[in-house]
Image (tube, grey):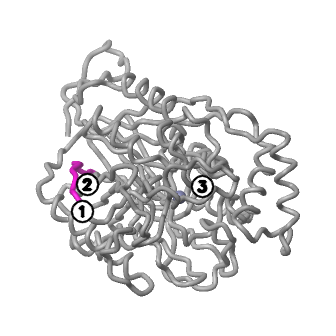
């Protein structure tokens, strides 16, 4: 709680200052079920998937914070990727119903690869009915979190989980990198080279072992919500045609159990957001992981991350009040688009598919991407956002951000973490250096078409936002 002098309305006796008025910090959390129907498209692979079995329900997990003056909302939804249209519609619905400014909401996708398609990637197409449903459900989740606002205290901390993150881009022995599906022969790294590939030399980049988190408690100390952030693409290893929230969902459940918050009213909400994981996954290519059945690795990772966070929460100093601020801006980014000749050649490659219009080979899949990109505009406007919660900065970038970028922001602005795939979707965000190295994440497709210098422009844009926010927590 913080004491403020507040002006009261002009009364008959004249203007005066009220004696000490209390300003409360409040928080609320809620979830919305966003599970798609059986038979729905599942995206995340080069071929489309079909939902045949619901292993665990999908959710939009919502946290609302209010310092008495400013309200901020963070939403993390179980989806591979979510485009700007859906996020903007959800924000508009919340704004219309509650007056909360759109800029005060940060919405992101987890990047689980076993969810309903909301964005056209690979050979998956979204259903407009499911897109509309999810926008509505996200908005409802936010409104329910706002309805749950209650006096709360807040803190943040971090844990280290170094053994569940691996850089998936590898430098290889000469001769062990094949040409790309676009015919490029100069790649110097191979993504997902295969476990114990004899050509392995060393990973082409670092990992970020930190799990940053925000912990919110009721005034009596009961956990209200916990939002974590870890730089891990997803885990995977679900059954065929399975719908699952991957380790992001498993983490939320385990967090409630570990904090003893399973049977609360309103329910405790655990949330795992995706950090900067564009080049990071959970596969040890040196071969030290035992083989697991379906969901085996998801459970291992969720257990370890949740336990590390539960241990770290114990030493977090929760505060009765912290100031909340937010800054947002748009940056214009160029796209890497194909030339006329490339598009014509790609059309010819597509025709070779015996299953046309479905593509069979990687060469055909990338040819189709080339043809689809021909209709893209030369530039896009990408939203950047930084929320300041006490002395913690949380950035939002609308892409699959390489870990080097998140580490750079941590070096400059700790304590901080970055939420990827937030507020829009513009594919992979490698650094210019990684563009030079090549590899899967740089191959031109709708899922990788930002200009080579996009990360430089995004970091500069975020830097402006950091400078706009108050430098010191009150
Ligand atoms: Zn990805």
The residue carrying pointer 1 sits among few (fewer than 14), some (14 to 19) or many (20 or more) residues within 10 Å by Cα, namely many
The residue carrying pointer 2 sits among few (fewer than 14), some (14 to 19) or many (20 or more) residues within 10 Å by Cα, namely many
Q: Nearer the viewer, residue 13 or 337?
A: 337
Q: Residue at x 36, y 46 (%)?
A: 65
Q: CA distance from mark 2 to mark 3?
A: 26 Å
- Based on the displayed image, in which of its 4 quarters is residue 355 positioned? bottom right
Q: Relative to residue 359, is residue 295 depicted above or below?
A: below
Q: Which mark is residue 61?
A: none
Q: Which SS type dominates the magenta stretch? A: strand
Query: For disc 1, does the CB lie below 8 Å from ligand 1?
Result: no
Q: Which residue is mark 1?
A: 223
Question: In which quadrant of the rendered image does the N terminus lie?
Answer: top left
Q: Which residue sits furthest top?
A: 14
Label 1 with label 2: CB-CB less than 8 Å: yes
Task: Give the mark nearest the N terminus, 2 or 3.
Answer: 3
The residue carrying pointer 3 sits among few (fewer than 14), some (14 to 19) or many (20 or more) residues within 10 Å by Cα, namely many
Label 2 with label 3: CB-CB less than 8 Å: no
Q: Nearer the viewer, residue 206 or 420?
A: 206
Residue 281 lies within the magenta run: no
Residue 159 lies within the magenta run: yes
Image location (x, y in percent) of residue 376: 76, 42
Q: Which residue is mark 3?
A: 82
Closer to the eye: label 1 or 2:
2
Q: Which residue is mark 2?
A: 215
Q: CA distance from mark 3 to mark 1?
A: 29 Å
Q: CA distance from mark 1 to mark 2?
A: 8 Å
Closer to the eye: label 3 or 1:
3
Q: Residue at x 45, y 26 (%)?
A: 460
Residue span colored magenta: 151-160
């Amino acid at each position: 709680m913080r004491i403020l002098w507040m002006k009261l309305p002009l009364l008959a006796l004249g203007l005066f200052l009220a004696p000490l008025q209390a300003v409360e910090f409040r928080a609320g959390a809620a979830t919305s079920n966003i599970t798609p129907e059986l038979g729905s498209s599942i995206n995340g692979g080069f071929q489309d998937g079909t939902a045949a079995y619901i292993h665990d329900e999908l959710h939009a997990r919502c946290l609302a914070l209010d310092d008495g003056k400013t309200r901020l909302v963070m939403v993390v939804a179980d989806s591979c990727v979510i485009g700007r249209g859906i996020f903007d519609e959800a924000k508009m619905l919340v704004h219309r119903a509650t007056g909360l400014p759109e800029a005060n909401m940060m919405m992101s996708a987890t990047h689980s690869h076993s969810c309903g398609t909301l964005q056209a990637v690979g050979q998956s197409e979204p259903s407009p009915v499911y897109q509309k449903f999810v926008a509505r459900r996200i908005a409802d989740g936010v409104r329910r979190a706002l309805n749950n606002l209650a006096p709360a205290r807040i803190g943040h901390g971090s844990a280290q989980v170094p053994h569940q993150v691996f850089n998936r881009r590898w430098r290889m022995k000469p001769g062990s990198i094949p040409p790309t599906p676009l015919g490029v022969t100069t790649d110097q790294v191979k993504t997902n080279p295969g476990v114990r590939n004899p050509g392995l030399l060393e990973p082409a980049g670092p990992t970020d072992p930190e799990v940053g988190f925000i912990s919110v408690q009721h005034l009596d100390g009961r956990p209200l919500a916990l939002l974590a952030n870890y730089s891990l693409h997803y885990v995977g290893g679900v059954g065929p045609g399975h719908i699952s929230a991957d380790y992001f969902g498993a983490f939320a459940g385990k967090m409630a159990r570990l904090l003893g918050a399973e049977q609360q009213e309103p329910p405790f909400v655990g949330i795992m957001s995706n950090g900067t994981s564009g080049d990071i996954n959970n596969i040890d290519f040196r071969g030290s992981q035992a083989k697991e059945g379906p969901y085996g690795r998801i459970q291992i990772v969720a257990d370890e991350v949740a336990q590390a966070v539960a241990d770290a929460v114990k030493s977090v100093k929760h505060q009765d009040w912290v100031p909340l601020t937010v800054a947002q801006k748009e940056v214009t980014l160029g796209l890497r688009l194909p030339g006329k000749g490339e598009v014509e050649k790609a059309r010819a490659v597509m025709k070779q598919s015996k299953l046309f219009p479905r593509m069979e080979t990687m060469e055909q899949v990338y040819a189709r991407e080339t043809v689809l990109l021909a209709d893209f505009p030369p530039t896009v406007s990408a939203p950047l956002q930084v929320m300041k919660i006490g002395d913690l900065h949380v950035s939002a970038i609308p892409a699959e951000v390489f870990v080097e970028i998140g580490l750079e922001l941590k070096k400059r602005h700790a304590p901080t973490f970055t939420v990827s795939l937030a507020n829009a979707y513009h594919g992979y965000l490698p650094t210019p250096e990684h563009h030079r190295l090549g590899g899967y994440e740089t191959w031109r497709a709708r899922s990788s078409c930002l200009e080579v210098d996009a990360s430089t422009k995004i970091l500069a844009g975020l830097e402006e936002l950091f400078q706009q926010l108050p430098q010191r927590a009150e």
